[in-house]
Image (tube, rainbow, N blue to C red):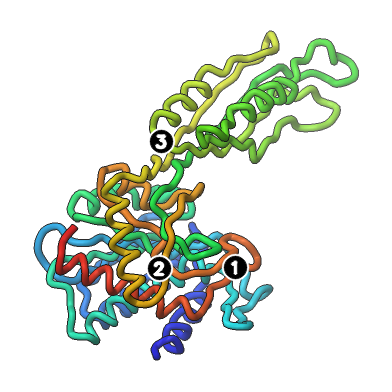
Amino acid sequence: GHQHDMVALLTRLIELESPSGAKPEIDRLAGLLGAEAQSLGADVQLLEQETAGSHLLARWGTGPGGTLLLCHMDTVWQVGTLADRPIRVEQGLLYGPGALDMKGGIVNALWAMRALLHLGLPPRRRVTLLINSDEETGSTTSRSTIEALAREHDVALVIEPAQPPDGALKTERKGTGAYRVEVTGRAAHAGVDHCKGINAIEELAHQILTIQHFTDYVTGTTVNVGLAGGGTRSNVVPEHAWARVDVRVTDQVQAAHLDARFRALAPRMPGTALSVSGGIGRPPMVRTPAIAVLYQRAAALAREIGFEVPEAASGGGSDGNFTAALGLPTLDGLGVVGDGAHAAHEHVILDSLPQRAALLAALLHSLDQNPF
C-alpha cells in the first residue's frame, strides 16, 4: 500500500543528481535525506567534509551495541545524465541513473524505519544509519567513520542492491584494489636518434603481459589493466608510460601474495626504471560462520513474509568489506532488486521496494528483540 509513496521518494532522490565529488549536489541531497530521517524521529547529524560531500548520520534508540545500516548517496553518473536519459517506468520497472545503486536502497532504509514506527515497534536498542558520499570512489573520507561505528555496533546491514538475477543477499565480497605502474625510459628523436632512445611504452607492454597473467580463476584473483598511456608525440621515443590496474581477491592470503608479485616487478629492458604504487583498498568480506547465521535469520524472515532470498558472492566491493574485516557480522544486498548498476539500463523492480523494505524492517525488529 505504500509503494506509490516509495516510488515518489525514489524519483525525488534520482532527480537530485549526485555524482561522486560533486559537493554542492551531494550536500543538497544530504539535506533532504536528513529532513526525511528527522521526520522519522531520528537524531540527525551532518558530517561536513572539506572537499567531498557531507555524510549523513541518523540514530534511533539508545544503549550500547545495536545495528549499523550502511548506504551511500553518490552515484557514477555525472550531472546532466537525466537530460539524456530521463526517469521512465515500463512494465513495472523504474529506469534512472542511480536508481538501483543505490537510491532505491536509501528509500528502503527510511521506509523500514517508517514501518516499525507505524506499527508501534520503535527500536529499543540503537539503530545507526550512515549514508556516505564517496562509496563509489573508495570511501576515502568516510572509511574511518565506518570503522569507528563498526566497533560500536553488534551487526552491520548493508543496503546495497540485491544480487541479480534472483535478488540474492551477499554473504561474501572480493577485496578490491588498484595499482599504478610507471615506466621511465629515455626520450629521443624517432628519426634522427632512434637508436639513442629507450621506449617506455615498449617496456610497459612487457609489464602488462606479465601483470595480466597474475589472474588466477582457481583462487578467484582477477587482475585487469584497464587504463594505459604514455609518450608525447609519434615522432618522439617515449620517455614515460603508465598503466592503472584493477585487482580483486577473495581473502587476505591472496591479497598479500598478489601484492608481493606487484612489488617484485622488475624492468625487462636495459636503461628503463619501474615504479609501482597502490594496493588493496577494500579488504575481502569473507563468509564467516557468524555471517552465515545472520543470512539464515534473514532468509527465514523472508520466507515468513512470503518469498525466498538466496545468498551469493560478489566480485564487487562495498562498505561492508570494511565492517566484515573488523570481525563484525555483516549482511549485504538488502537493498532493492533490479539490474544494470553502472549501466545505461540501470533499473529497479518496483514491487521489490515494499517487499525488501518489509524484510529489512523484520530483520531490524528481530535484531532488536534478539540481539545478534
Q: Which residue is mark 3?
A: 251
Q: Name the residue nearer the viewer: 256 or 38.
A: 256
Among numbered discs 1 and 3, the one appearing first in the sequence? 3
Q: Which residue is mark 1?
A: 346
How far is mark 1 from mark 3, CA to CA?
30 Å
Q: Which residue is mark 2?
A: 27
Do labels 2 and 3 touch, CB within 8 Å? no
User: Which residue reaches farthest top?
Assistant: 270
Q: Quadrant of the C terminus?
A: bottom left
Give the side of residue 216 with respect to residue 30, left or right. right
Do labels 1 and 3 touch, CB within 8 Å? no
How far is mark 2 from mark 3, CA to CA?
35 Å
Crowding around mark 3 (Cα neighbors within 10 Å: few <14, some 14 to 19, many 20+) is some
Q: Amino acid at mark 2?
A: Asp
In the rendered image, which quarter is residue 149 located in? Answer: bottom left
Tell which tag, 1 or 2, sits nearer the viewer. Answer: 1
Residue at horizontal 51%, vertical 75%? 14
Residue at horizontal 20%, vertical 72%? 43
What element does badge 3 sit on? loop
Q: Amino acid at mark 1?
A: Glu
Residue 289: image location, x then y, percent? 28, 46
Residue at horizontal 67%, vertical 27%? 208
**In the rendered image of this protein, does residue 143 appear above or below residue 121?**
above
What element does badge 2 sit on? helix
Crowding around mark 2 (Cα neighbors within 10 Å: few <14, some 14 to 19, many 20+) is many
Q: Name the residue nearer the viewer: 51 or 342.
A: 342
**In the rendered image of this protein, does residue 26 appear above or below residue 200?**
below
Among numbered discs 1 and 2, the one appearing first in the sequence? 2
Q: Quadrant of the N terminus?
A: bottom left
